Image (tube, rainbow, N blue to C red):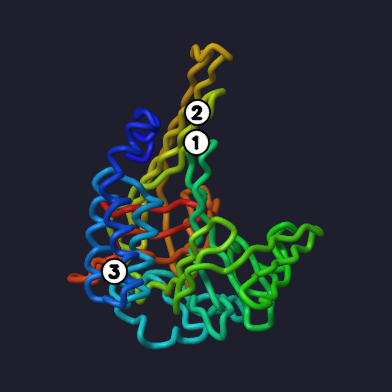
Amino acid sequence: MYTALLSLPWVSHAQQAASGAALFQRGQQLEAAGNRAAAATTYQQAYAAYMSVDDSDGMIKALAKKKALTGEGLPPAAAAPAPAARPVAVATRAAAPAGAAIAAPLAGRVAGGKPLGLFFMTRYWIGSHSLEKAAYYFTPAGQAYQNPTGFGAADLAALPAGLRGSYTVTGNTLTIRWADGHTSTSALQDVHSNAFNWDTGIFLGVQPFANTQQLTGTFEGGNSISTSSGSAAVSSDLTFRADGTYSGGSASSFSGKDTGGNTTYDAGASGAGAGRWSLNGWVLTLTNAQGQTRRGVAFPFEMDDKTGRVVRFYFDNVAYKRL
């Protein structure tokens, strides 16, 4: 469970993850020495070590390194360009009305020193012991979008001004000028064909689901935050069935502390829902029994190299893991 992170002292967690960190450092040394095969193997070992302590940040970092060296772990269809505006929907879903097709963005890659397409970003915040997750979309025309809910012109224009803007790359510096007037600028680091680091975040180029069958099954995800004044955690699970139905539940917990570290309150809530789901290109839509919809960008970011099954995917600011 992601909420289990809150029950572990952070120092203890960091010590347990040291073996993953040591393996990752060894992989970097091998890569710098030009031994790509050994480096890729070591990054895979680092990934397994990070996984054993549920260190999502380390796992994603090690996976990005391995992918950059070998390309392994990508969806089976990754070698071919994503088909333009090809809807992928469950068989029982009625055809979308004319004009409702969702635009297909580019899969994430780095070309000519510039990011293009869709990237999965993770950024660890020490102060809150939390892992920020987001989707960034870089267009060939020089536009940048954070956490789009879709890729049609109306979807992108509807984003808050602080989540859409224009970007430029000068030398090795990437600058995003957001529509609300603020600017984000930082050096591009550790750049590979489909991954880079920027503004303390790790960016991994992603591909779309190859078909809806990849999403069938049960997944669990969540987010947590912990500070000196309290903590909060949210977990959710989703089960997708081949007949186009889904079910799921969620739970949240909150607690507060005074300046002496004593707990001042504890609260929590839970709920469940069910309905129908559809996957249209990169966009996943859940419609419950009351007709309310939850819609967001979805993509796999970890695959089982042997079976081709999706192990982890991102949807609506949450990273889900297959159970």
Q: Position of residue 212 (x, y in %)?
A: 35, 70
Structural crowding at the residue carrying mark 3, measured as other residues with C-alpha within 10 Å and reported as few (<14), some (14–19) or many (≥20): some
Q: Position of residue 30 (x, y in %)?
A: 29, 69
- Would you identify the image quadrant in which residue 322 lies? bottom left
Tell me, yes or no, if residue 295 can be seen here.
no
Specify the amino acid type for callout 1: Ile
Q: Which residue is mark 3?
A: 30
Image: 120 above or below 52 = below
Q: Determine contact: label 1, label 2, CB under 8 Å.
A: yes
Structural crowding at the residue carrying mark 1, measured as other residues with C-alpha within 10 Å and reported as few (<14), some (14–19) or many (≥20): many
Cα–Cα gap, marks 3 and 1: 35 Å
Q: Residue visible at 53% across and 57% down?
A: 201
Q: Earlier in the sequence, mark 3 or mark 1?
A: 3
Specify the amino acid type for callout 3: Leu
Q: Which residue is mark 1?
A: 225
Specify the amino acid type for callout 2: Ser
Q: Residue furthest left?
A: 306
Q: Determine contact: label 3, label 1, CB under 8 Å.
A: no
